[in-house]
Amino acid sequence: MPDAPGLELLRGEIELDHPGAVLATSFDRDQPALIVNPAQILDVLRWLRDTPGQRYAFLSSLHVADYLPAAPRFAVHYELLNRDRVERIRIKAMLADPAADDGASGQSPRTDALARPQDSAPTLPTIDSCVELFPTAEFQEREAFDFFGVVFQGHPDLTRILLPDDYVGWPQRRDFPVGGEPVTFTYNERNYG
Amino acid sequence: MAERLLTEDRTTELMTVNIGPHHPATHGVLRLIVDLEGEIVRDLKPVIGYVHTGIEKSCEDKSYWKVIPFVERMDYVSYFFQMEAYCGAVERLIGLEIPPRAKYLRTLFLELNRIHSHLVWLGTTALDLGAISMLWYCFRERDRILDLFEMATGQRMHTRYFQVGGVIEDIPLGFEAKCRSFAEDMPVRVGQYEALLDRNEVFLQRTKGIGIVSRERLLELGVTGPLLRAAGEPWDLRKTFDYLAYPEMDFNIPVGTVGDNYDRYRVRVAEMVESARIVEQCLDALPEGPFIADDRKYVLPPRSELSTSMESLIHHFKLVTEGFRVDPGEVYYAIESPRGELGCFVLADGSAKPSRVHFRDPSFVNLQAFKDMALDSYVADMICSLGMLDPILGGVDR
């Protein structure tokens, strides 16, 4: 793992090529993380994958976490792995919830500007898909869309993967109640439904 | 001959066939939509989610220690690995060091579980290829492992043996001898399996040169574990990352050369022998001392203290009712499961319940390589490739 000074050096190098791409760094529990401007996520991922001496070429995991009540609320996590140096680094892209009430959630102007208008789903948080860079992300981005409603622009087939296609809602969000799903029995459905 | 048949000009139409979701050859509730041109697979789409039970969501409603039995039921064949990924992630969140004996015991049970998982794979996959007797031989040895689990933990499957801080109980008297005799027998048994399969003309023809995917493509697709090693990439988290007692263990990483289904079989079979070696080394070097950390804020006090110490009683009550709180933070912890990189991401928000538990399941990611493995092969070879992929649908769907 890059240590805390190494992480700052890495940030400096990325900033040289992509100014403004890295918003912050964090080094917590021996795990380094870069918090990245979601609009430049592909630039950073490509830089980390292709720059000689970095070669974070393996995407271990892509998942989303919901930090409610913090704002911006969602974060897409990219767990990158450099297999030569055996180093992991986490890239986080924070996404605001466009459906949230502007006054109440206290969004910063920066995140507002990033929530680009969408034709298909104007109320969902949006980020560029990294399937082109890491084909392994295909299923994982579909899973993130399925459970959090994060739209990955440019994904070849962004449909629900584990839940039924006609499911309504984003169940892994923190404001979706546990047990919010009524159990339907065909017997009850037929006789009383 | 297959080459000539595949390039032959055909006038047959494409036919879309649905396989599953409830078919014995899909090793679980997996549905495949396959475009066939005659007998040859031209396109393929796996449809998953039939056993999705929302385990990750349910975990958010449970205190940290109650999550352990939940995550065991994701990948129901390698439950010890699920526990280790989760418990290890929580231990890293709270900065809890586990005692050496617990490290060795965990390593011991993980490797027994790896053998168990590979035996289930070998039995069922050989069954798909018509080698029915393999199933009985593999399940005979598997039963000895389950007996060992039952002896140490009280349960044959889903043992809830690993705890945050160590393991719940020490191994009982007589376990060591029984385990040692199993570890000694296992390489002999593996030799018998090889004698049954390695000179079996049907098995060889069904596996050699089938389902080849290059190592570069596998890495792009994020494939890990025996599938990647069969393509010649010696990548094993047990060697590369420092966790549990693996740095002290002497074992080899079997790799293949071609990356076909035969190599996948060879790699897994060789891994069973290596795992048996690790089990023996764990028993040889098992350190004395406590089997669980002595931190009353996270670990239940010994039962005997409850009737004599008021303080222990209070700790016990607090841990059982509310559970322990974890300072805000997030951790990703990955281990080498029988199917590849099993990662667990835990997000703590300061309360006694995790705010997010996510598993990077190797079956889920590896399944993306299935299309590459099965494309332009016969339907029968697709079934063989699926078996060699070894997906556990409980882990895929979670």
Image: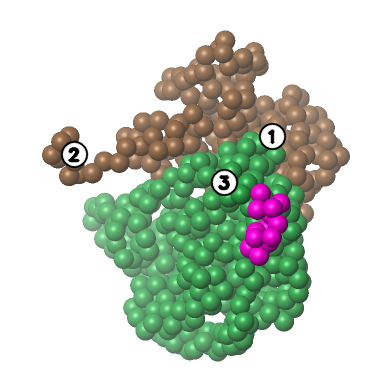
Chain colours: A brown, B green
Instruction: State how far apart marks 1 and 3 are (Cα).
Output: 45 Å
Q: Residue at x 70, y 57 (%)?
A: B309
Q: Which residue is drawn at 45% across and 53% down?
A: B396
Task: Give the vertical position of B165 relative to B253 (above or below).
Answer: above
Determine the residue located farthest toward the left in the rendered image.
A191
Tell me the chain of label 1: A
Highlighted range, magenta: B301-314
| Left or right: where A27 falls relative to B26 | right
Residue B76 part of the magenta segment: no
Residue B196 placement (x, y as % from top left): 44, 87
Q: In terms of sequence position, does the residue under pointer 1 or pointer 2 come before the other?
A: 1
Residue B223 placement (x, y as % from top left): 56, 56
Which amino acid is tagged 2?
A: Glu
Tell me the chain of label 3: B
Q: Mark 3 points at which residue?
A: B321
Main SS type for the magenta part? helix
Instruction: State how far apart marks 1 and 2 are (Cα).
Output: 51 Å
Label 1 crowding class (10 Å Cα cut-off): few <14, some 14-19, many 20+?
many
Q: Mark 1 points at which residue?
A: A44
B241 or B243, which is in the foreground? B243
Which amino acid is tagged 1?
A: Val
User: Do discs 3 and 2 belong to a common subunit?
Assistant: no
User: Residue B181, located in which quarter of the rendered image?
Assistant: bottom right
Does the CB distance between marks 3 and 2 fall below 8 Å?
no
B262 or B254, which is in the foreground? B254
Q: Mark 2 points at which residue?
A: A189
User: Residue A78, located in which quarter of the rendered image?
Assistant: top right
Instruction: State how far apart marks 3 and 2 are (Cα).
Output: 38 Å
Circle 1 or circle 3, nearest the eye: 3
| Left or right: where B271 falls relative to B292 | left
Which element is circle 2 on?
helix
